[in-house]
Amino acid sequence: MPVVPGRHEIDARRESFRPVSVRVVVRDRDPAPLKMILPIAELREMAVASDQTGQVSTNPGENLDVVSIDRNTLNDLSMLDQDIVGSVSCFLDSSALGSGGATLVVNGLETSRIGVSPSGIQEVKINHNPHSAEFSRPGRGRIEIVTKANADAYHGTFNFLFRDYHLDARNAFAVERPPEQRRIFEGDFTGPLGRNGKTSFLITANHEDQELQAVVFASTPTGLYRANVATPEGQTEFSLGLNYQIGKKHTVSIRYEFGRDFKKNVGVGEFNLPEVGVNERGREDHLFFTQRTVFSAKLVNELSLHAAFEDNRSESVNPGVRKVIVQDAFTGGGAQVNLHSTRDHLQLNDAVTWLRGKHSIKTGVNVSDVGRRGAGDRTNFDGTYSFSTLENYTRTNPFLFQSNSGDPHIAFGQMVFGAFVQDDIRLRPNLSLGVGLRYDLQKHAPDGNNLSSRASFAFSPDRKRIIVIRGGARLFYDRAPDGAIGDSIRFDGVRLRQNLINNPAYPDPWQSQAIPQEIPPSVVRFAGDLRSPYSFQYGIGVERQLRKGTTITVNYVEIRGVKLFRSRDINAPLPACRATAYRDRVRQPSTCAGQGSSSLRRKRRTLRL
């Protein structure tokens, strides 16, 4: 077909090359040959180390008893309200959890929240490389999440979830079916930024609105109280990540995350009347910086920094009113909650990977937390009355009054530091060893300096390597939780006092009792002989490849927990001891035989198939 004379634009495209457009002018005579040069598309360098050639791997870190959920599986996984962490928590081992619960690791950094929308998650792993000294917590108590990488082509995902009460069954204690509704909007968008092909972005967003209802079913002096009380809550999360490639050896990533949530009438329901509700709101800001440098094919360094600012508030719906607890009847008055807490902290991870001969060495530092905790807690400053029965309440005959007084403000610094070295040695094609050493330090902990070791092996007895025997042992130290540290500072006998009065007057508890200063204070402190809890884990297993893509594993794992944390009321007598008056118990701790040890031992064996 002849080309009509005039101005035209020629577009040339070919796979692996950048498209080129040229404007030309076509006249009546035959055109001269046109030469178009297509530059090569952006060159991306990727190093993949794998021993998987259709066989079971003998690398120490490639255990097959790992729970790995990729993006495709996440799309097909049925999850309540897109709660990925809650859905995969069933794969955790309760005996491997520390005092703070499961450890959440996002892109190599410990954190308390994912920070991106569910569609922005690429992979979730549990028990990945359990013997490595890089991690401070056991693999069966650790959830590792990898977020989506920025793409060089535009791509997006949007999800909308809707649930309505018309499909729910009526609560047996409710007057009518609670009109609840849940709406979740979430998605992600990624692509290149600019024309140089070196910069890309990733945006994720998640917004949840939940119109929930609590059912109150309580006995009051005026009769049975039944009602549905609205307890709405919502959450908004937004993140923006930028990835910039500096040459072929340096990559820099920056990500900002914002989160805000609120809850109303928390605690209302069952025996708790609407007047004891609590309103909560919080905000978090996170900034991440990652730099990856490839010095050579055998030397790689990755640096990660994280700064976070958190602010949370909890306030009573009915402030300034004393709380009233009537056992097996109702709880009313006010919630007696007034808490404002802040947390500002920094994290730093720096790891170097070095390949030399048969050795794959990884060493670095994990500064999991350096920051400040602050709290102003005026909880129960007005006090709480307790009644044993509804009849005693009508007779104004309480059996206990509790209140706090003093200075509710505390602030303390925190530091959690770790350093490690891990060496994976390939002795033979069918035999590998892994050895590691880790040092952990925590401020405020009575026994904060801890050194632990890790060892593992992987051996294939046949040449085809369809069977691998894998085993190892490791030692993990636990951390003192922030709540216990805060209580030891708050309830030191001077700063904040807990007042208890037996058989108090009503409605003024101080009417016929001593003044508050004369009541012995409650003191929270760490035991003088307290040592950091630790868990010793060891096991052995067999991995067998049945056919390509199908394997079976059988593992025996034993976990021993030693010196685990627990709290004790050292003044409370054992059941066999004679009860004494409250003041005598406070001033003269019980000396009954068999008072108990300050340490606990826990042992658990599991056989996994």
Image: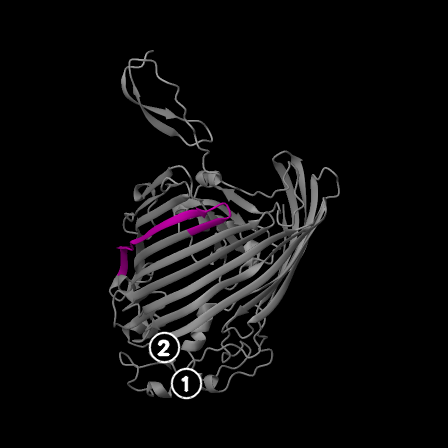
Q: Is residue 608 above or below residue 601?
A: above
Q: Residue at x 52, y 73 (%)?
A: 445
Q: Which residue is mark 1?
A: 520
| Residue 28 coordinates in the image, percent (x, y) | 29, 13
Q: Residue at x 31, y 43 (%)?
A: 164
Q: Residue furthest top?
A: 1
Quarter-of-image position of residue 537: bottom right
Considering the image in quadrants, where does the C terminus appear? Answer: top right
Helix, strand or loop under label 1:
loop
Q: Earlier in the sequence, mark 2 or mark 1?
A: 2
Q: Is 260 positioned to the left or the right of 63 in the image? A: left
Quarter-of-image position of residue 198: top left
Would you call the spot at circle 1 few (<14 residues within 10 Å), some (14-19), or many (20 or more)? some
Disc ID at residue 360: none
Q: Which residues are magenta?
A: 224-253
Q: Is residue 294 magenta?
A: no
Quarter-of-image position of residue 401: bottom left
| Residue 513 coordinates in the image, percent (x, y) | 33, 86
Q: Residue at x 34, y 88 (%)?
A: 514
Q: Is 553 positioned to the left or the right of 413 in the image? A: right
Q: Which residue is mark 2?
A: 400
| Residue 388 coordinates in the image, percent (x, y) | 36, 72
Q: CA distance from mark 2 to mark 1?
A: 16 Å
Q: Amino acid at mark 2?
A: Leu
Q: Is 357 positioned to the left or the right of 277 in the image? A: right
Q: Is residue 230 magenta?
A: yes
